[in-house]
Amino acid sequence: MQTSHSLLLDGHTLTLDTFESVVHHRRPVRLEPTAIRKMERSRKMVEDLLQSGRTVYGITTGFGKFSDIVIDRSQARDLQRNLLVSHACGVGTPLPEEAVRGMMLLRANALAKGNSGIRPLVVERLLTFLNKGIHPVVPGQGSLGASGDLAPLAHIALPLIGEGTVRFKGQERKTKDLLHELEIPPLILESKEGLALINGTQMMASLSSLALLATHHLLNAANTIAAMTVEALNGIPHAFHPLLHQVRGQAGQEICAARLRQLLSGSGRVTAPGERRVQDAYSLRCTPQVHGASLDTYTYVKGIVERELNAATDNPLLFPEEGEVISGGNFHGQPLALTADFLAIAISELANISERRTERLVNPQLSDLPPFLTQQGGLHSGYMILQYAAASLVSENKTLSHPASVDSIPSSANQEDHVSMGAFAARKLHTVIDNVTRVLAIEWICAAQALEFGSGPMGEGTEAAYRLLRSTIPPLTDDRETSVEIEKAAAFIREGHLSHAVAEYLSDKG
């Protein structure tokens, strides 16, 4: 490991960009020295509390409804192990590797703040696993998002004590066997450490962070693909005039309108008001208003999630300098539950308006283009059924966008009587993102095909998008299977290739 390029965790300065560098690009991570000192101070406070015999939740007591039961110090190690194994009750399909890496990073960063009373040794071992690519197998279901993501984080913590299951170099392994092979001794957790490892919002935060990274590409793609459709339909970009958007004053709307003007700059395929029609339908004319509102939502959600990346979310929290140990509820996932639901709604709207633009491309009653973008209608169906697929995904998203955060179900004998359901909100957000990506891919394919029937130069940005698609998907001349092509286009969006291709092209144009 080249420590000169390592990310230093201090509990305060993690960003989405540095999160991505670790989760996607395997950047190594280590603790910042000041973080180690802070952790040592809070650990000493735990030891002092144990020595004093004072009753403190989670340090000298049981957990949840058992918080009134005092635990003898001689049983502290057994208590930590029992906590992990009893809470590791997750079910369902395991979380993707990126989500697990994000959880490991975020839990380590939260502990690095020095408010959790855990030994630096434990966090360093978690980072050893992360750096070596030893990834716990974490079932995706089982968290209420209230006392944090208890079950998922228990599955993250189990391998530290040599239990549970991990994935290493593409294979699922029993942790104890792998650690023996790698000569890594299992840890024995001391008082408070089991609770510090599993009490937090890191599943919600990891999934939300990954969703934001994906949404950034979706927003860029949506503007580019919409601009292609405007060109294909000989649309009227006068509706994107800066004066119109300035007088409303919505930041996202102004940004999207400016982007559309840039993408369409130099196009010989757009028209002026009255040249073909006085104004376009809403799905073209109101693109800045709709996309801009989704951008504003993204910006709002990003602010909350980035704060959560550096949050202390376990319980109780220790403040050595003030001499305080405070039992509260920072583990409650309500901020992330609400934002995951909000982002799902906002992203769904990108697909809603995209599908309407696709309909205008393939429906001969709404344009001068050949029916379903084929010259031999009847013998050929062309892109008729692509709109069906888009419509089905849009309809799915309407159900998935129902907020999970409005639900609550009590647990722990009514001690935990309000929960956020943030884990489910974050999981279904990713399904929405996948659906939106494919809806935009369908519009992209149809817009490129529609442009085959026009003439004149394309816009500076739309030409780059057209060329990228045509590098792998040829124009449609005869009917062919298109599901593979949709997935290829979706991958270009998902992996950021469309965003980068357009940015590079516009940069080259000066």
Image: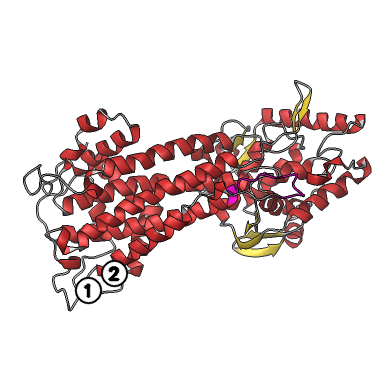
Residue 139 at x, y = what percent? 64, 59
Residue 505 at x, y = what percent? 25, 44
Residue that label 1 marks: 381
- What range is drawn magenta here? 411-423
User: Against 321, is 36 above or below?
Assistant: below
User: Against 235, is 431 above or below?
Assistant: below
User: Which residue is at a point 25% across and 28% down the rendered structure image?
Assistant: 247
User: Against 39, is 356 above or below?
Assistant: below
Tell whether position 15 is magenta: no
Q: Main secondary structure of the magenta part?
A: loop
Q: Secondary structure at mark 2?
A: helix
Residue 334 at x, y = what percent? 59, 41
Q: How is the image coloured?
A: secondary structure
Q: Residue furthest top?
A: 322
Residue 260 at x, y = what percent? 24, 41
Residue type for callout 1: Ser
- Count of numbered circles in the view: 2
Residue that label 2 marks: 385
- Verify CB contact (< 8 Å) between mark 2 and mark 1: yes
Front residue (pair 449, 432): 432
